[in-house]
Image: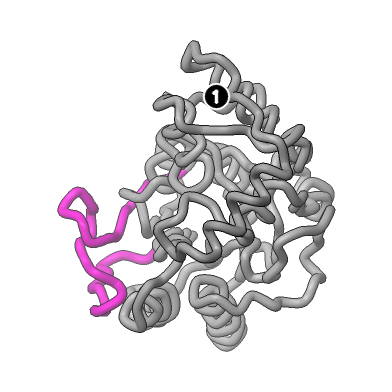
């Protein structure tokens, strides 16, 4: 059985990938928690790796939140970029370099708030610290892997569905559970989503490959479809719909109130505008078949 080193195993994506990965690989985990096989804070230290690995799956990183201070902005670069560099230094000192390095990146690198079927060839315009730190990490790995003769695959992920999701899906679940969530307009805006288990399932297809791939479920459910799915699983009524004009007025008020406002123009735009990414390249080149999120997403 081939050996795989996984970083970020105690995070949301890592937890959801482990049951799938364990079926195909001898798994070693690396991270800050004592639950990991190799305990190390990659953002600050270079870990000691006493074994060689066929595959390194680098899923550790600081997730997207809006930074409020310069320190919070700097943390994105310390975790996402310096952490990646420290992992590469550790691999250089290990008994053997990996055959394949898989980096978990994000569709945020494209820097787009709206668009349909965005491909991997789209320019990288992400400017916020989260997107920029991921872009820099991608570029560092491209140079490092080329220099070391290691195959590199970059996976750019959209919203990720799985048990206890963070981000927008998590906020939607919490809002519906408390009755404090309102649908906006017809909730027709489509968003790309991928199952966390499918991210794990694609790994065997990446061995020895080089490339950049968007991963989505290939369908891109609408906000309304996700709201209905979550409401049904919680035995809740589908959220009440707030007319767009009323939401627009509240968003304008939110612009004046600042960070504490539940909605502002930026948040409203992300809700009502479609943002989808093409996974045709992954499906065609890797012969990977994603699972429909609406059929497979269980919130608990």
Q: Relative to residue 282, is residue 189 depicted above or below? A: above
Instruction: Indicate whether residue 136 is drawn in magenta.
Output: no
185 vs 51, nearest the viewer: 185
- Left or right of 121 on screen, residue 139: left
Relative image position of residue 246 (x, y in whole percent): 67, 42
Q: Residue at x 49, y 77 (%)?
A: 129
What residue is drawn where x is 63% and y is 22%?
Answer: 228
Q: Position of residue 141 (x, y in %)?
A: 55, 79
Is residue 190 placed above or below 212 in the rendered structure?
A: above
In the rendered image, residue 52 lying in the magenta stretch gets the answer yes
Q: Point out the residue furthest to the left here.
A: 34
Q: Position of residue 224 (x, y in %)?
A: 69, 30
Secondary element at tag 1:
helix
Q: Residue at x 54, y 38 (%)?
A: 161
The image shows residue 39 at horizontal and vertical percentages of 20, 62
Part of the protein shown in magenta: 25-53
Tell how many labels.
Answer: 1
**Quarter of the figure with residue 72:** bottom left
Residue 102 visible to an observer of this rendering: no
> Hey, which quadrant is residue 223 in on the image?
top right
Residue 190 in sight from this viewpoint? yes
Q: Which residue is the site of mark 1?
A: 230
In the image shown, does 245 or 195 lie closer to the viewer? Answer: 245
Majority secondary structure of magenta residues:
loop
Image position of 227 with respect to 198: above or below: above
The one of 235 and 52 positioned closer to us in this rendering: 235
């Amino acid at each position: 059985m081939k050996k795989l080193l996984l970083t970020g195993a105690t995070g949301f994506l890592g937890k959801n990938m482990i049951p799938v990965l364990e079926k195909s690989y001898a798994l070693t985990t690396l991270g800050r928690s004592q639950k990991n096989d190799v305990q190390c804070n990659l953002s600050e230290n270079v870990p000691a790796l006493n074994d060689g690995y066929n595959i390194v799956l680098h899923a550790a990183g600081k997730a997207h939140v809006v930074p409020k201070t310069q320190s919070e902005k700097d943390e994105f670069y310390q975790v996402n970029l310096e952490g990646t560099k420290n992992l590469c230094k550790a691999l250089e000192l290990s008994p053997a370099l990996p055959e394949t390095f898989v980096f978990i990146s994000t569709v945020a690198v494209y820097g787009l708030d709206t668009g349909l079927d965005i491909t991997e060839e789209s320019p990288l315009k992400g400017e916020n610290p989260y997107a920029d730190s991921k872009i820099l990490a991608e570029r560092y790995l491209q140079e490092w892997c080329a220099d070391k003769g290691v195959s590199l695959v970059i996976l750019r992920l959209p919203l990720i569905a799985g048990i206890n999701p963070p981000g927008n899906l998590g906020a939607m679940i919490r809002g519906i559970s408390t009755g404090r969530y309102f649908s906006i307009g017809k909730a027709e805006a489509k968003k790309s989503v991928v199952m966390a288990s499918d991210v794990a399932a694609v790994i065997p297809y990446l061995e020895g490959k080089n490339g950049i791939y968007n991963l989505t479920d290939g369908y891109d459910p609408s906000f309304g479809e996700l709201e209905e799915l979550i409401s049904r699983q919680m035995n809740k009524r589908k959220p009440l719909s707030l007319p767009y004009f009323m939401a627009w007025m509240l968003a304008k008020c939110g612009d004046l109130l600042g960070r504490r406002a539940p909605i502002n123009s930026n948040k409203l735009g992300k809700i009502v505008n479609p943002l989808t990414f093409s996974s045709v390249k992954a499906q065609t080149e890797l012969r990977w078949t994603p699972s429909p999120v609406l059929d497979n997403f269980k919130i608990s």
